[in-house]
Structures are given as structure tokens and as C-alpha cells.
């Protein structure tokens, strides 16, 4: 879908030719500007259009309006959160087969962040997965016009939102693909395709390269699969040469059976989403090519399948990680932390300013936070605050969880340096404590996205989270660095003689 930004008053919007004209109406709206303004005021006065965000009122070919269909959508107080709810409420209308060109009109001047929220929500609402369908169903929305009273005031926000939406869609597309259409090899090819974009470099390593690096934990997970592993490294050099990079690490288990500790059959198909962290890294780099922030970024993806054949890792096996630490594998279904620990050790080679990993790691995090917020664990208070703040602004929220030393007691082993699981209590925390052992003193954060990377049931599909959160954090880091560089340096005064 393509987007365009236009300056349109409500009177001008009434003359705009399109299949669907969706108007975002804030609470207490009283401006009778042309046919649309009058219609909105009458609908609110009659109580047919409630002020609650997401409430809609449809009209077909109303008099004085060029569009075939008009939908009035309440956006409450006009905040980005309310606007997002309003636009998501338009999903069915945006996906209608007859709608090829649509316009999304702000009845009043948008608040800061509202255009960003509206565009990304529209992209989410209109997204349709088609990669493995034999025949496309219906017709895609081809053009969405964003109409505001003054386009120049929100042009930068609009352009940024386009880039973020493209990154989120790239992540969703790869996470949604069935495991036989998103093998580690194909994930590597997807990463290589990003290297065709401006400023992106890519290196993909195979089993022999990984063996030379000594990634024994990663290799152990992959050994039960016929699909060869891939270790993907992406680079974006937007900052000054020599500036310490920010490293993103994404869990890339392209299908997780649980291995010998086999998962139950119901809903096992959803384990194709176990590479949601990897998909997020790909999505971030897709957007970085357009956003071009002044920051250096490294993306690392350890990609493999977790399968239960005769060569597979067994409960009780002890493996040696790249760090040299030995790990007793008590549960082969706790494989994500095994591939991540070697990638985190490798990340240290870049002497990074910070490391952030994201992984569909634990069911325990789903129980704790549900599907609203990702779990955030960090060894650094400032980094945690940055990520949590970025998530709030990006409408991709997370919540900080504890990392008390006592939680690590359950990972003790009689036969290795550490076990890969503790008991059932605080499972998301003990998983994070395991990962913490492999990051040293580098500021580090772990995002457990098991509850947020995809949805099940009728709405089954990837969400593309936490791409928006990560891009906001990277942009904030770039802005903070630019501000620090621009700050005037105090000159030393010579003592008076």
C-alpha cells in the first residue's frame, strides 16, 4: 500500500474522489465545515456517533460528498493512543474488496504523534498475508491519503511513520511464513536482500563458520534438524566511524517442536512464530535504510530449527558455550536461551554501547503480562528507562521485570556451570538470569516478546512487535548523541596576571 500526505479542509475532503473517506472526529467537535462537518456534528448531537475511540458511523454516498462511502470514526481526546484505536476500528472497511483508494481525514489539527499513530494503525489494519496463497483473495488497498489541515507541519512525522510501517510489515511478513517457507537458509536470503538497500551490510555464516567460532550451545540446538543453521550479521553504519554500536540480537528458531522435550500437539503450528525476535531485527534494518539515524547498529540472528531426531540434544546433555561456560540441558524446549547465549557472547566483540536482545522466550511472561506489554529485563537502569519510554511513545509498550541475584539460584547444576532452566516459579526471570551470565559488564536489556510477537485464535498472525519500540529507541539515541555533540564546550579561562 502507498501513502500520500495532503492538506485538506473538511470542505476540500468532501470533494476528494476515493472509494472510502474515513473522518477522525474528536470529542466535542462542533465545526460545521461543509457537508462532512455538518454530518459529524448532527451525528454527535443525535447520539449516533459516540465519543469513545473506535466507535464508527457509516454512510453511503451522502449528498455533497464525492466519496462512495463515508465513515465517521470517533477518536476521543485525539491522543495518539485514541487515534490508533479509532483507525484499527476501521479495519473491516479498509479491507473491503471494493476499496482501492481511501482517505483518512483529521477533522481537527492532529496532536503530536497522532499522524504517526494513524498511519501505522492503518498499515496494520490493511495488512493481508498472501505469500503462500495460490490465489489472492480480494483486492488490496492501493493508496491511502492522509489528510490534515496543514500538511507541512507533520511532514517529518509522516515520513518517519512510513519507514516504521515498512519495517513492521517486513517483520510480520517473515514471521507469518510457514516454517518450510522461512527456513534458516531463507531467513539468511531475506537478510541479504536488505543489503541491497542504502547503508546496510550483511554476512551470513553456515555450520562450519559457527563451529570455528566455538558456538557449542547454538550448534547443539541445531544438530537435530536436517535444515542447516545460519548465523546472520547485519550492519548499519550511520554514526561516526569508531562510535560504539548498539547491538540487537534476535532469537531465530524458525520452528520449535521442543526437541526431545516435545511440545503438546495443539497449537504447535504457532511455533513458526518462534523466530519473532529474528523477524524484528530484519524489520528494524529494513526501516533503518529509510530513517538513516546517526547511530551505528549491529543485528545478530542465530537461526535454526529445534527438532527431535536421533541426533537431537537430549535432556541431561552438557554443552559448552562460546563463552566457555558449560550448560546442563535439563529441558530441550528451553532452546532459545541456548542459541542466544552464544550470540550475546559474540556481540561482545563489537565493544557495544549497549546490547538488546528480543525473543519469544517464555510462556511464563505471557502469564505475567499477557499480550499487551513485552517483558523488559535489564542490568542498566538508564537503558531500561530509555526502552520503556520509547515503548510508550511508539505505542509498543513494555514493562520492567526484576533481576534479583536470588532468582539465579534455581539455575545451579551438579554437572555443569549452569542449568538451562530453573523451576516453574518466575520462569521468565530465571530465563533472563541465564542470559545475563553471557553479557559481562555491557549495558544489556532483554525483551521477552512471547506474548506480544503474535496473536492466536481468529486473529492468528504476527504483530511485528517490538520493531516500533526499537526504532524509537535508536532514533532517541541518535538524537541524544547529536545534542551532546552540539552542546557548546566551555572554554578554559586563563588566570588574570
Image: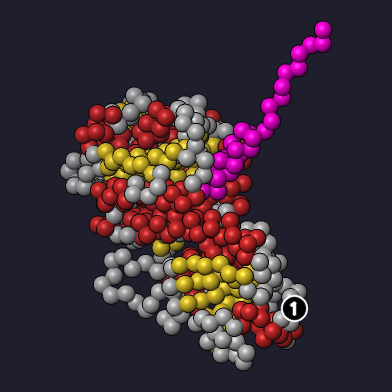
Q: Dot 1 corresponds to which residue?
A: 31
State the image quarter where residue 6 is shown. bottom right
What residue occupies the far bottom of the structure in this picture? 63
Q: Is residue 330 visible?
A: no
Is 466 left, or right, of 213 in this rendering? right
What residue occupies the far front of the structure in this picture? 497
Q: Position of residue 410 (x, y in %)?
A: 46, 33
> Which region shows up in magenta?
470-497
What secondary structure is marked by label 1? loop
Q: Is residue 390 visible?
A: yes
In front: 80, or 207? 80
Tell me which residue sits at (36%, 26%) in the image.
323
Q: Residues within 10 Å of mark 1 (few under 14, many from 20)?
A: some
Magenta-drawn stretch contains 480: yes
Q: Quadrant of the N terminus?
A: bottom left
Up/down of 18 relative to 381, above or below: below
Q: Position of residue 35 (x, y in %)?
A: 67, 86
Is 177 left, or right, of 309 in this rendering? right
Is 77 left, or right, of 224 in this rendering? right
In front: 486, or 462? 486
Is 460 left, or right, of 113 in this rendering? left
Q: Quadrant of the C terminus?
A: top right
Tell me which residue sits at (37%, 35%) in the image.
343
Magenta-drawn stretch contains 364: no
Amino acid at each position: 500500500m502507498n501513502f500520500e500526505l495532503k492538506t485538506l479542509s473538511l470542505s476540500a475532503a468532501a470533494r476528494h474522489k476515493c472509494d472510502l473517506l474515513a473522518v477522525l472526529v474528536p470529542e466535542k467537535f462542533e465545526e460545521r465545515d461543509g457537508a462532512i462537518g455538518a454530518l459529524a456534528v448532527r451525528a454527535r448531537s443525535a447520539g449516533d456517533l459516540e465519543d469513545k475511540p473506535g466507535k464508527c458511523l457509516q454512510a453511503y454516498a451522502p449528498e455533497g460528498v464525492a466519496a462512495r462511502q463515508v465513515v465517521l470514526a470517533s477518536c476521543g481526546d485525539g491522543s495518539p493512543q485514541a487515534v490508533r484505536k479509532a483507525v484499527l476500528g476501521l479495519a473491516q472497511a479498509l479491507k473491503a474488496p471494493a476499496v482501492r483508494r481511501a482517505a483518512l481525514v483529521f477533522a481537527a489539527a492532529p496532536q503530536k504523534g497522532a499522524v504517526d499513530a494513524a498511519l501505522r494503525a492503518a498499515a496494520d489494519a490493511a495488512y493481508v498475508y498472501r505469500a503462500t496463497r495460490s490465489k489472492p483473495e480480494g483486492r488490496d488497498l492501493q493508496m491511502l491519503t492522509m489528510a490534515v489541515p496543514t500538511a507541512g507541519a507533520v511532514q517529518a512525522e509522516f515520513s518517519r511513520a512510513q519507514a516504521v510501517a515498512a519495517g513492521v510489515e517486513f517483520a510480520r511478513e517473515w514471521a507469518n511464513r510457514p516454517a518450510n517457507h522461512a527456513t534458516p537458509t531463507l531467513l539468511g536470503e531475506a537478510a541479504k536482500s536488505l543489503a541491497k538497500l542504502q547503508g546496510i551490510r550483511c554476512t551470513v555464516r553456515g555450520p562450519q563458520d559457527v563451529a570455528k567460532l566455538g558456538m557449542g550451545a547454538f550448534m547443539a540446538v541445531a544438530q537435530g534438524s536436517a535444515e542447516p543453521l545460519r548465523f546472520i550479521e547485519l550492519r548499519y553504519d550511520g554514526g561516526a566511524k569508531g562510535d560504539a554500536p548498539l547491538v540487537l540480537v534476535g532469537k531465530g528458531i524458525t520452528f520449535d517442536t521442543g526437541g526431545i522435550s516435545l511440545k503438546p500437539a495443539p497449537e504447535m503450528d504457532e511455533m513458526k512464530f518462534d523466530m519473532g525476535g529474528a523477524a524484528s531485527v530484519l524489520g528494524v534494518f529494513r526501516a533503518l535504510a529509510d530513517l538513516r539515524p546517526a547511530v551505528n547498529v549491529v543485528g545478530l540472528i542465530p537461526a535454526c530449527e529445534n527438532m527431535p531426531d536421533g541426533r537431537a540434544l537430549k535432556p541431561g546433555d552438557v554443552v559448552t558455550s562460546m563463552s566457555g561456560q558449560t550448560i546442563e540441558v535439563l529441558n530441550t524446549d528451553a532452546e532459545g536461551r541456548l542459541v542466544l547465549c552464544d550470540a550475546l557472547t559474540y556481540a561482545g566483540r563489537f565493544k557495544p554501547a549497549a546490547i538488546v536482545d528480543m525473543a519469544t522466550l517464555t510462556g511464563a511472561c505471557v502469564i505475567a503480562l499477557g499480550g499487551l506489554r513485552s517483558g523488559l529485563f535489564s542490568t542498566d537502569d538508564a537503558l531500561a528507562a530509555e526502552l520503556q519510554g520509547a515503548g510508550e511513545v511508539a505505542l509498543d509498550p513494555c514493562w520492567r521485570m526484576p533481576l534479583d541475584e536470588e532468582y539465579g539460584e534455581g539455575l545451579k547444576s551438579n554437572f555443569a556451570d549452569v542449568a538451562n532452566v530453573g523451576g516453574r516459579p518466575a520462569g521468565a526471570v530465571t530465563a533472563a538470569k541465564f542470559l545475563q551470565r553471557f553479557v559481562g559488564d555491557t549495558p544489556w536489556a532483554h525483551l521477552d516478546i512471547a506474548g506480544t510477537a503474535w496473536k492466536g485464535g481468529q486473529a492468528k498472525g504476527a504483530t511485528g512487535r517490538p520493531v516500533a519500540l526499537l526504532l524509537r529507541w535508536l532514533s532517541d539515541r541518535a538524537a541524544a548523541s547529536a545534542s551532546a555533540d552540539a552542546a557548546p564546550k566551555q572554554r578554559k579561562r586563563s588566570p588574570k596576571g
